Image (cartoon, rainbow, N blue to C red):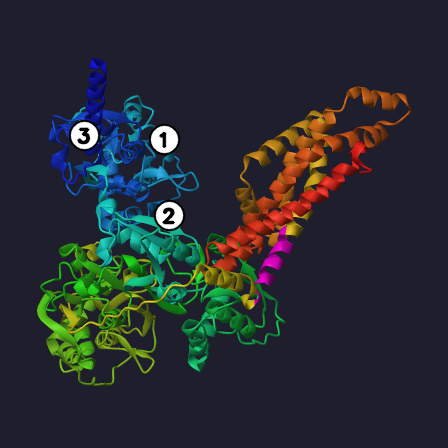
């Protein structure tokens, strides 16, 4: 009995210990002060432990080789906290859910490069370079390039130099993104790397980059193995005793990372976008929505998916808490599933374009002309109405096409309603009709090729297609790889959630409309304006929504999607004057003047502009211009004749003609206060004006790239802009004000459920019968069968030849066969398939089916050749000798004696490899082949059924494999003497 109580006491003690440790483990850390006595996961060779100890003397440490390893340890609960450089931690956390950065910094530090103390001249050279790039604007461009939040996709700018003065050895630790890290091509890149490239160029020395553990970079410098080192190295007094630091090039700090329990702790109810800050948000991979969520929801888990169908399915199955999708597609999926609802209907405004090969600008220009033509004659509106209003009911019109001038290779996915989808066995949709009409206009025979989305972009980049369309959003990264047409369609993107997770909006407090709630309100502003920068800086907790056109923001305000719009006073008075439901709040948030932007390398032009502006101010011309265009009562504009110069070098003016009354389009002509002013200035200079209308956010870039001589578009000179361009004297004070509305509209709906039997019946009809979708399956089955049979036949022949080489006495043939087998076995099949299609056969006009057959045959041959060799070597050598002794030649001995036995031995394993080949063909969708799996993807994209099509395809693959296996078994019986007569 005594022992029983002792055991019971021990068990209770263990339970208490486990409970306490569990509570400690699960306790959420929200403040640095809670870490005073914690054990930190530190990175070996860094100064993090010293910095943390200086802040918290009672802390202890465990050590890891890299910040990634330390973060993973915290994520798994092995460690409580880790600390490292804040910009690097943000990049790691973007890929490591379940962690968060505490808002308080452990320390604020400066980063610098380091050189050997015996080489002060190199330090001076590095300092001089830093001063130079900060002065000429290159430093700011580097900061924008590498610290944009998406450094992995950034490419190093081309930097070429002869390198006649020896070698500059640079030591770094390429795990410190965005300072130094490996890119997708296994090249080392980053902010530090680009700086050292510039340094090597300035010294005319070839650059040698050596990647090593962080703890080894300072020893490599001291030992002379490196001339300069950099990997976001913190400048400390301790290190300064051993090395020479350059001037600081980055102000950062050490931050703490702990586990994030917020997603589990939060209520499942969602009332606004702020509730998604630490949730799972689904986006289309590489889209503008992806970019938006990554930048605006840094603590959220971003789930990136290829297809809109799969995106909607992920929400339905609970894999995402919300999805951000363009509203045209989103509203279609909401019709399919009544459990979906908008959390916020307008989050971004996206523009779509068609993609062309970079070198095929002629075709792109022809398409732009065609687009303008159909907009003018009404065809454009007809197409949009057809596919946007009710895409399922829409029918593709008959488009006559002579097709006498060649072929237009068209790439699309066939899986994105209403842009591109399959109807009655044909690819149709908004984008498809645009392209087919363009093909008819150019008398080019259309050849539509189906790809998955990543393969779609790759196809036009590699020249496999001439034009691609599938609601492709224009991004800066994509524009580096393909030529975009003019935007042909714009759509709002909304945040969609499950209706059951949506909070009751009737219980939500109504926002005030006097501007007092600006710090937490949802505010719209134009991208790249001072208004946007003001809200980001002064009210970081506000929900800022950026628009390329201020009228899009106003429309969102009227629809109740925004609480306020922040815009210039001149725009606000025109908009509010035309809509009495909108009001302008009296307080001015920003008082800044508008000025003309000019390139840094045009001081003479700047001088002339300022002289003319001064004269206009003096003689009253400027006041007259302002009075003509600025009308507080929204009265009409006073048009006057403006003297113009028709000869001389044109003055290219970049302008955003969507900012009435400053610059806007009227009667198909760009006009406004800014336009009159610049035309009068140009007349004084003696140059005609040529306008280049673009988005406001692109104006500075156009100036910096030499696409424009100056910019005038109600632009205010900020400190950041002044680092890149010069500004003239101010010509008009245009304050930023808030617009709002007095009322909001709301609505909701409901629906009744259906029975399981009815759902099954609907699934069968929708997936097989409706629109003759069984034809998709039949055609896909034929493609899969053809690829499987042809690849197996060709692979068997090739495998036999490889087997002969492998068994040859010639060393060269043996080596070739062995290398071939090892190489093909070592490359993943999908990688090999894409290499063959996009690289090896890229210059040839060869179909995806042919490439698939060749690729699978090559891979099949690598495996069956070894099967053949093993089966042949398994036949007793004495039988070969006996055959020769009986008078047979070596060939006849092999053909009549050895081969039948070898086939009998190899068929069982050959059969398994053949079935594996059949199943492997499911990846051919990567190269625009519509096989059985691709057919199921197309059906899923139409029916919004994630389960039935997959089960259906699984059954069809099983049936195909069974039939082919049965055929091989009949062949096996043929070569088995004891079973031939059965």
Residue occupying the point 28% across, 74% down: 686
Q: Which residue is mark 1?
A: 211
Magenta segment, principal secondary structure?
A: helix
Q: Quadrant of the N terminus?
A: top left
Location of residue 26 by image quarter: top left
Query: With 902 as the anchor, is 406 left or right in this view?
Result: left
| Residue 84, horizontal then vertical, whole percent | 23, 35
Q: Give how far apart the Cα atoms at labels 1 and 2 are.
A: 20 Å
Going from N to C along the chain, the mark reached first, 1 or 2, is 2
Q: Give how far apart the Cα atoms at labels 2 and 3 are.
A: 45 Å
Kind of element beneath mark 2: helix
Nearest to the observer: residue 120 or residue 537 = 537
Most extreme residue toward the front is: 1
Kind of element beneath mark 3: helix
Please state which of the two labelled residues, at mark 1 or mark 2, is closer to the viewer: 2
Q: Which residue is mark 2?
A: 153
Magenta region:
772-784
Residue occupying the point 65% across, 28% down: 815
Q: Residues within 10 Å of mark 2 (few under 14, many from 20)?
A: few
Tag of residue 57: none
Residue occupying the point 51% across, 55% down: 949
Nearest to the observer: residue 587 or residue 168 = 587
Q: Give how far apart the Cα atoms at labels 3 and 1 are.
A: 44 Å
| Residue 208, horizontal then vertical, whole percent | 38, 32
Location of residue 689 by image quarter: bottom left
Q: Which residue is mark 3?
A: 20
Please state which of the two labelled residues, at mark 2 or mark 3, is closer to the viewer: 3
Going from N to C along the chain, the mark reached first, 2 or 3, is 3
Please state which of the two labelled residues, at mark 3 or mark 1, is closer to the viewer: 3
- Does 82 sit above or below residue 964? above
Going from N to C along the chain, the mark reached first, 3 or 1, is 3
């Amino acid at each position: 009995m005594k022992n029983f109580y002792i055991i019971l006491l021990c068990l209770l003690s263990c339970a208490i210990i486990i409970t306490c440790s569990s509570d400690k483990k699960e306790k959420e850390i929200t403040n640095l002060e809670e870490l005073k006595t914690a054990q930190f996961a530190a990175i070996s060779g860094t100064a993090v432990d010293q910095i943390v100890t200086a802040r918290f003397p009672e802390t202890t440490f465990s050590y890891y080789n890299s910040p990634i390893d330390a973060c993973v340890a915290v994520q798994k609960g092995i460690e409580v906290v880790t600390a490292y450089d804040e910009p690097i931690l943000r990049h790691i956390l973007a890929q490591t859910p379940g962690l968060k950065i505490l808002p308080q910094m452990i320390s604020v530090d400066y980063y610098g490069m380091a050189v050997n103390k015996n080489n002060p001249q190199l330090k001076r050279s590095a300092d001089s370079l830093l001063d130079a790039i900060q002065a000429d604007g290159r430093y700011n461009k580097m900061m924008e390039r590498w610290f944009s939040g998406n450094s992995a996709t950034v490419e190093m700018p081309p930097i070429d130099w002869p390198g006649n003065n020896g070698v500059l050895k640079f030591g770094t630790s390429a795990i410190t993104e965005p300072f130094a890290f490996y890119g997708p091509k296994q090249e080392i890149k980053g902010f530090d790397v680009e700086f050292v490239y510039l340094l090597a160029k300035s010294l005319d020395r070839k650059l040698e980059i050596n990647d090593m553990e962080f703890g080894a970079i300072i020893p490599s410098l001291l030992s002379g193995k490196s001339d300069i080192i950099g990997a976001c190295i913190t400048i400390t007094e301790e290190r300064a005793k051993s090395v020479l630091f350059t001037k600081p090039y980055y102000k950062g700090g050490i931050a703490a990372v702990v586990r994030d329990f917020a997603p589990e702790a939060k209520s499942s109810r969602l009332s606004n976008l702020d509730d998604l800050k630490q949730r799972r948000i689904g986006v289309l991979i590489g889209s503008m929505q992806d970019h938006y969520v990554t930048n605006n929801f840094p603590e959220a888990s971003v789930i990136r998916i290829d297809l809109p169908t799969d995106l909607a399915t992920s929400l339905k199955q609970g894999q995402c808490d919300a999805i951000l999708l363009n509203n045209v597609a989103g509203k279609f999926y909401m019709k399919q599933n009544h459990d979906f609802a908008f959390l916020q209907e307008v989050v971004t405004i996206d523009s779509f374009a068609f993609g062309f090969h970079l070198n095929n600008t002629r075709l792109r220009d022809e398409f732009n002309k065609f687009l303008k033509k159909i907009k003018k004659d009404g065809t454009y509106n007809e197409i949009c109405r057809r596919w946007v209003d009710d895409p399922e009911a829409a029918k593709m019109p008959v488009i006559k096409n002579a097709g006498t001038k060649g072929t237009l290779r068209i790439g699309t996915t066939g899986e994105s309603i209403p842009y591109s989808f399959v109807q009655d066995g044909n690819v149709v949709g908004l984008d498809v009709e645009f392209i087919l009409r363009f093909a008819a206009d150019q008398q080019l025979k259309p050849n539509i090729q189906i790809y998955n989305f990543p393969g779609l972009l790759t196809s036009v980049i590699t020249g496999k297609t001439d034009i691609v369309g599938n609601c492709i959003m224009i991004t800066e990264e994509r524009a580096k790889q393909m030529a975009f047409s003019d935007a042909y369609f714009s759509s709002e993107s909304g945040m969609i959630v499950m209706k059951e997770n949506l909070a009751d909006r009737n219980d939500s407090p109504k926002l005030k409309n006097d501007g007092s709630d600006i710090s937490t309100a949802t505010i719209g502003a134009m991208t790249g304006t001072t208004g946007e920068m003001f809200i980001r800086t002064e009210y970081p907790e506000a929900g800022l929504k950026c628009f390329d056109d201020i009228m899009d923001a106003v429309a969102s305000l009227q629809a109740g999607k925004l609480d306020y719009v922040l815009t210039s006073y001149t725009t606000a008075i025109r908009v509010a004057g035309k809509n009495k439901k909108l009001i302008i709040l009296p307080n001015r948030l920003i008082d800044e003047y508008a000025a003309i932007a000019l390139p840094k390398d045009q001081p003479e032009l700047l001088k002339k502009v300022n002289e003319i502006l001064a004269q206009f101010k003096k003689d009253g011309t400027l006041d007259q211009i302002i009075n003509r265009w600025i009308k507080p009562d929204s009265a009409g504009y006073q048009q006057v004749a403006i003297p113009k110069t028709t000869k001389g070098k044109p003055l290219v003016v970049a302008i955003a003609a969507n900012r009435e009354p400053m610059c806007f389009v009227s009667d198909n002509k760009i006009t406004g206060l800014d336009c009159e002013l610049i035309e009068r200035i140009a007349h004084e200079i003696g140059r005609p004006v040529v306008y280049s209308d673009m988005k406001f956010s692109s104006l500075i870039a156009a100036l910096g790239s030499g696409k424009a001589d100056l910019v005038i578009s109600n632009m205010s000179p900020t400190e950041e802009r002044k680092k890149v361009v010069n500004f003239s004297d101010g010509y008009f004070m245009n304050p930023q004000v808030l617009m709002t509305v007095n009322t909001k509209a709301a609505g909701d709906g409901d629906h009744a459920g259906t029975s399981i039997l009815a759902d099954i019946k609907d699934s069968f009809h929708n997936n097989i019968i409706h629109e003759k979708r069984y034809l998709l399956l039949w055609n896909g089955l034929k493609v899969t069968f053809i690829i499987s049979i042809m690849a197996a036949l060709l692979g068997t022949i090739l495998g036999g030849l490889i087997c002969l080489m492998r068994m040859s006495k010639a060393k060269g043939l043996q080596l070739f066969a062995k290398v071939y087998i090892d190489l093909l076995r070592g490359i993943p099949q999908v990688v090999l398939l894409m290499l063959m299609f996009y690289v090896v056969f890229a210059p040839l006009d060869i179909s995806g089916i042919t490439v698939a057959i060749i690729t699978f045959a090559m891979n099949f041959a690598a495996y069956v050749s070894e099967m053949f060799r093993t089966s042949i070597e398994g036949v007793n050598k004495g039988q070969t000798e006996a055959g020769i002794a009986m008078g047979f030649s070596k060939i006849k001995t092999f053909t009549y004696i050895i081969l039948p036995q070898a086939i009998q031995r190899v068929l069982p394993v050959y059969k398994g490899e053949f079935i594996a080949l059949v199943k492997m063909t499911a990846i051919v969708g990567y190269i625009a082949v519509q096989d059985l799996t691709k057919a199921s993807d197309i059906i899923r994209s139409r029916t919004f059924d994630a389960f039935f099509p997959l089960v259906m395809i699984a059954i069809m693959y099983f049936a195909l494999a069974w039939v082919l296996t049965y055929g091989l078994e009949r062949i096996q019986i043929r070569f088995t003497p004891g079973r031939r007569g059965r």
